[in-house]
Image: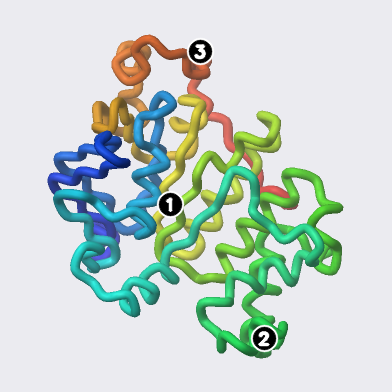
């Protein structure tokens, strides 16, 4: 139990600027090992900037952010790269190589853990290939393993992206609007798969989602951003219409459904 409450992300008095504009200003934020966090907020609230800062792509102008015990502001480049390999990132538009097969795309998740020149020539170890095969099986794409990525459906392509992250063996998984390109049914299936994969590997999951209903269903904690600041940080049960108004004030999120919470409707794994 002690391990699961260990902070993997610790933010204190963080400020991030693009030029002269402050786009992120966080007093304090803690994310513990094993948590599944949904981040919501209007466009321009700083959601993607927060994920990019956690990943180490953006340097804060003030304050401190520690990820997996590392202070991004004080580490050297080699240390930064080692820690970045322990952080997986899933994109809205999949970011697959269209001409490569499912297996070849998933093997890209091993690039940070294998010899650089060998991997550039497509020479992966038997261990790398076994890890990739297991990741493909975990997302239910065994039959498509030698199929080109550009012949797959949108839902299948996002499952390839999930398998690629699984093959990376990360401790933290960041997902930036991973279902915005999918219809609601496929989106819920993909999020269900991502949640179960994260639990299976005892990783920490941080999701950016536009739909509050999905944020409630797939996060055990919801963080709401507005104008670069945290204005909500509570369990999903406390995300009421009044709190949504506080987060989105003047904007129009996808509304919460009336009646039963979607969290009461379990979803099967994709391919199960």
Image height of 226 relative to 255, above or below: below
Residue corresponding to mark 1? 205
The residues bearing labels 2 and 3 have C-alpha atoms spaced at a distance of 51 Å
Between circles 2 and 3, the one closer to the viewer is 2
- Tell me the crowding category of disc 3: few under 14, some 14 to 19, or many 20 or more residues within 10 angstroms, Cα based: few
Where, quadrant-wise, is the N terminus in this rendering? bottom left
Residue corresponding to mark 3? 259
* Left/right of residue 269 with respect to residue 81 in the rendered view: right
Say what secondary structure mark 3 lies in.
loop
Nearer to us in this view, 261 or 257: 257
- Mark sitting earlier along the chain (1/2): 2
Say what secondary structure mark 2 lies in.
loop
Residue 214, given in percent of the width and then of the height, sits at: 51, 31
At x 86% / y 53%, what residue is drawn? 151
Image height of 83 relative to 49, above or below: below
* Left/right of residue 165 with respect to residue 100 in the rendered view: left
Is the C-beta separation of discs 2 and 3 under 8 Å?
no
Residue 20, given in percent of the width and then of the height, sits at: 25, 37
Residue 145, given in percent of the width and then of the height, sits at: 80, 67
Say what secondary structure mark 1 lies in.
strand
Which residue sits furthest front? 19
Q: Residue 124 — which label?
A: 2
At x 41% / y 24%, what residue is drawn? 42
- Tell me the crowding category of disc 1: few under 14, some 14 to 19, or many 20 or more residues within 10 angstroms, Cα based: many
């Amino acid at each position: 139990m002690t391990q699961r409450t260990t902070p993997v992300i610790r933010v204190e008095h963080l400020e991030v600027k693009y030029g002269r504009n402050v786009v992120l200003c966080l007093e304090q934020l803690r994310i513990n090992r094993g948590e599944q966090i949904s981040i919501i907020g209007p466009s321009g609230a700083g959601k993607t900037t927060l994920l990019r800062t956690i990943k180490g792509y953006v340097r804060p102008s003030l304050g401190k952010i520690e990820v997996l015990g590392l202070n991004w502001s004080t580490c050297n480049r080699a240390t930064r790269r080692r820690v970045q390999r322990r952080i997986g990132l899933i994109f809205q538009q999949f970011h697959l190589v269209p001409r490569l097969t499912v297996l070849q795309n998933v093997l890209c998740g091993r690039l940070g853990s294998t010899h650089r020149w060998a991997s550039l020539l497509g020479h992966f170890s038997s261990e790398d290939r076994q890890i990739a095969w297991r990741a493909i099986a975990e997302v239910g794409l065994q039959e498509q393993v030698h199929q080109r990525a550009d012949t797959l459906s949108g839902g299948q392509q996002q499952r390839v992206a999930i398998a690629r992250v699984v093959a990376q063996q990360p401790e933290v998984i960041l997902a930036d609007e991973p279902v915005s390109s999918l219809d609601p049914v496929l989106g819920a299936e993909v999020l269900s798969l991502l949640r179960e994969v994260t639990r299976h590997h005892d990783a920490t999951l941080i999701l950016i989602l536009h739909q509050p209903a999905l944020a409630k269903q797939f996060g055990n904690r919801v963080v709401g951003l507005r104008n670069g600041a945290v204005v909500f940080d509570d369990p999903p049960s406390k995300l009421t219409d009044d709190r949504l108004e506080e987060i989105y004030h003047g904007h129009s999120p996808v509304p919460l459904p009336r009646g039963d919470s979607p969290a009461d409707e379990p979803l099967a794994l994709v391919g199960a």
